[in-house]
């Protein structure tokens, strides 16, 4: 996220929230309901961190990156 221009403190906040939701939804790659929950929670974390614009792109980047096995 920092590499995409997000402020460091916002990126850390989103990363912590993301880690919690991925732990909560361990089968998100296999179950569409869990993937939806992951996406919603990531959007909420981004907005809560102060990122009002570009949340769709950030969430898509996070999910697709992790789907391919990158962090």
Image (spheres, rainbow, N blue to C red):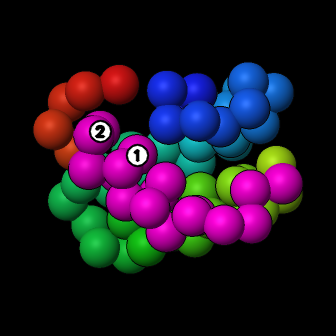
What residue is shown at x 27% (from left), y 40% (from top)?
65
Determine which quarter of the picture holds residue 16. top right
Which circle marks residue 3 in the picture? none
What residue is shown at x 57% (from left), y 70% (from top)?
40
What residue is shown at x 57% (from left), y 64% (from top)?
54
Which circle marks residue 66 in the picture? 2
Residue ID for mark 1: 62
- Position of residue 19 measured from the top left corner of the image (x, y, whole percent): 57, 34
- Position of residue 50 measured from the top left corner of the image (x, y, whole percent): 84, 54
Residue 20 appears anywhere in the view: no
Q: Is residue 57 left or right of residue 21?
A: left
- Position of residue 60 measured from the top left corner of the image (x, y, whole percent): 37, 59
Q: Which quarter of the rendering shows the C terminus?
A: top left
Whether the magenta-drawn stretch holds residue 58 is answered as yes
Residue 26 appears anywhere in the view: yes
Q: Is residue 25 left or right of residue 10?
A: left
Q: Is residue 12 above or below residue 10?
A: above
Q: Nearer the viewer, residue 47 or 21?
A: 47
What residue is shown at x 82% (from left), y 49% (from top)?
49
In three-dimensional space, the C-alpha distance between marks 1 and 2, rounded to whole angstroms, equals 6 Å
Secondary structure beneath label 2? helix
Q: Is residue 18 above or below residue 39?
A: above
Q: Nearer the viewer, residue 55 or 36?
A: 55
Q: Which quarter of the rendering shows the N terminus?
A: top right
Q: Nearer the viewer, residue 5 or 33?
A: 5
Q: Which residues are magenta?
A: 50-66
Does the residue at mark 1 contact the one at mark 2 (Cβ under 8 Å)?
Answer: yes
Q: Residues within 10 Å of mark 2 (few under 14, many from 20)?
A: few
Q: Residues within 10 Å of mark 1 (few under 14, many from 20)?
A: some
Whether the magenta-drawn stretch holds residue 14 is answered as no
């Amino acid at each position: 996220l920092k590499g995409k221009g997000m402020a460091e403190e916002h990126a850390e906040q989103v990363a912590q929230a993301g880690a919690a939701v991925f732990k909560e939804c361990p089968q998100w790659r296999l179950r569409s309901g869990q993937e939806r929950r992951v996406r919603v929670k990531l959007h909420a974390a981004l907005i809560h961190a102060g990122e009002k614009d570009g949340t769709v792109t950030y969430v898509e980047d996070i999910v697709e990156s992790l789907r391919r096995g990158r962090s």
